[in-house]
Image (cartoon, rainbow, N blue to C red):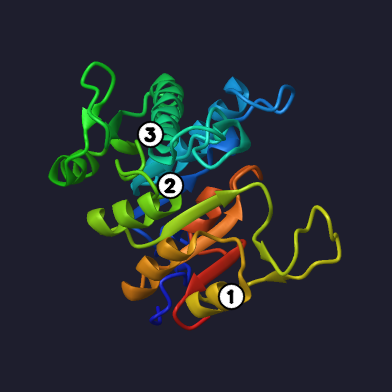
Amino acid sequence: MGNNPFDMRVISNGEQKPVFSRVLVKLSGEAFMDSAVGYGLDVRTIGSVAKQVAEVHHMGIQIALTVGGGNIFRGDSPSARGLDRATADFMGMLATVINALALQDALEKLEVPTRVLSSITMQEVAEPHIRRRALRHLEKGRVVIFAGGTGNPYFTTDTAAALRALEIGAEAIMKATKVDGVYEQDPLTYPEAKMYEFLSYLDVLNKGLHVMDATAISLCMDNALPIHVFNLFKEGNLRRVCLGEKVGTRVESNG
């Protein structure tokens, strides 16, 4: 295999072997939303996400996740107008804990040992975020879900994902979306829009592409942490990305 961490590996019996040993999956809160009402939790969607995560976990990959809270509350949303920004952001962080607990429940129903670590201490429902504890859980074969963002207002869950990925030594961030990758324009509005297969971090920043926010992209760029953007709602895509197949858009230094 060359220097490209996304090259596919094949073991001697012809079966594909994962190209990663540890990854972080970034999930938006909107991915959990009940589309019928435009907010809240869709249990079937959460179950589908859990099945994909379980599939990767059973491949022997150490997997951590961060979840957003936009399906319940966002600190920068219209519903937060009139609230102090810091207060609104803390409310959004609490929403991520609700999503994390729902995902933990779905994973444990599939017999996948899972731990929720929250940046906001709430001992009755989640463990406090301690880096060494997260690493220990991963080494023990448990899925780790990071909730509560960074624990600080004014930072998004994108930034939290980049920060946690670097803390645990993840080899890539898997940015799960509802579209196939990163497009030059919104593919839902412009069906003819071109999808990028490779991008550099600077391409993302200079073109103003909606991959992750600028702080998160800069963190990844400074630490050469690849980002893979793909459609989580196509069954098997997470497994395919982890096997090194060409799925979605890859963002790295030499895109």
Q: Is residue 87 left or right of residue 241?
A: left
Is the residue under label 3 in contact with that under label 1 (CB below 8 Å)?
A: no
The one of 205 and 127 positioned closer to us in this rendering: 205
Q: Is residue 246 visible?
A: no
Amino acid under label 1?
Answer: Phe
Asked where in the image residue 121 lies, by quadrant, the reply is top left
- Give the alpha-carbon distance from disc 3 to disc 2, as whole Å: 12 Å
Asked where in the image residue 78 lies, by quadrant, the reply is top right
* Mark seen at residue 173: none
Compare marks 2 and 1 and give the one earlier in the sequence: 2
Q: Could you tell me which secondary element the residue under label 1 belongs to?
A: strand
Label 3 Cα crowd, 10 Å radius (few <14 / some 14-19 / many 20+)? many
- Give the alpha-carbon distance from disc 2 to disc 1, as whole Å: 23 Å
Residue 221 point in image, percent of width and height: 39, 73
Residue at image mark 2: 157
Amino acid under label 2?
Answer: Thr
Compare marks 1 and 3 and give the one earlier in the sequence: 3
**Rendered residue at 60%/61% (across/down):** 210
Q: Could you tell me which secondary element the residue under label 3 belongs to?
A: helix
The answer to whether 78 is drawn above or below residue 26 in the figure is: above
Label 1 Cα crowd, 10 Å radius (few <14 / some 14-19 / many 20+)? some
Asked where in the image residue 64 lies, by quadrant, the reply is top left
**Rendered residue at 41%/72% (across/down):** 5
Residue 228 point in image, percent of width and height: 51, 62
Q: Could you tell me which secondary element the residue under label 2 belongs to?
A: helix
Residue 187 point in image, percent of width and height: 78, 58
Q: Is residue 170 visible?
A: yes
Residue at image mark 1: 198
Quadrant containing the N terminus is bottom left
Q: Nearer the viewer, mark 3 or mark 2?
A: 3
Residue at image mark 3: 90
Amino acid under label 3?
Answer: Phe
